[in-house]
Amino acid sequence: MLEIYRDPLCGRLLAPVAITPKSEYRGKTYYFCCDLCKQLFDREPQKYALEKDGKDEQNIKGDRHVMAKNS
Ligand SMILES: [Zn+2]
């Protein structure tokens, strides 16, 4: 069964493969849609990790990139 993870930055859902950018924070693994998301996460992991464990069951919020929002 495929495991789906949510990119904590932009909310994209991912099925990680070997080349998927990922980062560990407080013992949990987070996956990212691209290296940029990973870099931003690594800079301020506490801002994005929150209470989530990186997995998302049904709470799919769609496909928005936070970067555009915060400028
Ligand atoms: Zn992303």
Image (cartoon, rainbow, N blue to C red):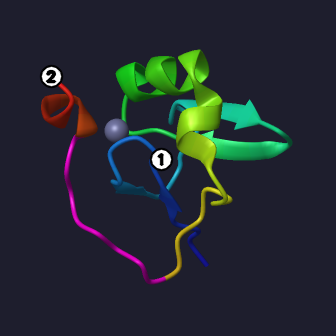
In the image, 11 versus 5, the foreground residue is 11
Q: Quadrant of residue 37?
A: top left
Report the mark closest to the observer, 2 or 1: 2
At 56% from the left edge and 16% from the top edge, which residue is drawn? 43
Q: Secondary structure at mark 2?
A: loop
Secondary structure mostly seen in magenta is loop
**Magenta residues, as a range?**
58-65
Number of residues whose C-alpha sits closer than 10 Å to that of mark 2, classed few (under 14), some (14–19) or many (20 or more): few
Q: Is residue 12 magenta?
A: no
Amino acid at circle 1: Pro
**First along the sequence among labels 2 and 1:** 1
- Which of the labelled discs sits on residue 8, or is there none? 1
Q: Are marks 2 and 1 in contact (CB under 8 Å)?
A: no
Seen in the picture, residue 32 relative to 56 is either above or below; the reply is above
Indicate left or right for 33 with 24 as reference. left
**Quarter-wise, where is residue 14 in the image?**
bottom left
- Residue at image location 21% in from the left, 57% down from the top: 63
Please name the residue shown 51% across and 66% down the image. 4
In percent of width and height, residue 39 lies at: 48, 17
Q: Residues within 10 Å of mark 1 (few under 14, many from 20)?
A: many
Residue 10 sits in which quadrant? top left
Locate the N terminus and report the quarter of the image it occupies. bottom right
Q: Which residue is mark 2?
A: 71
Q: Distance between the Cα atoms at labels 2 and 1?
A: 18 Å
Q: Ligand 1 near label 2 (Cβ, under 8 Å)?
A: no
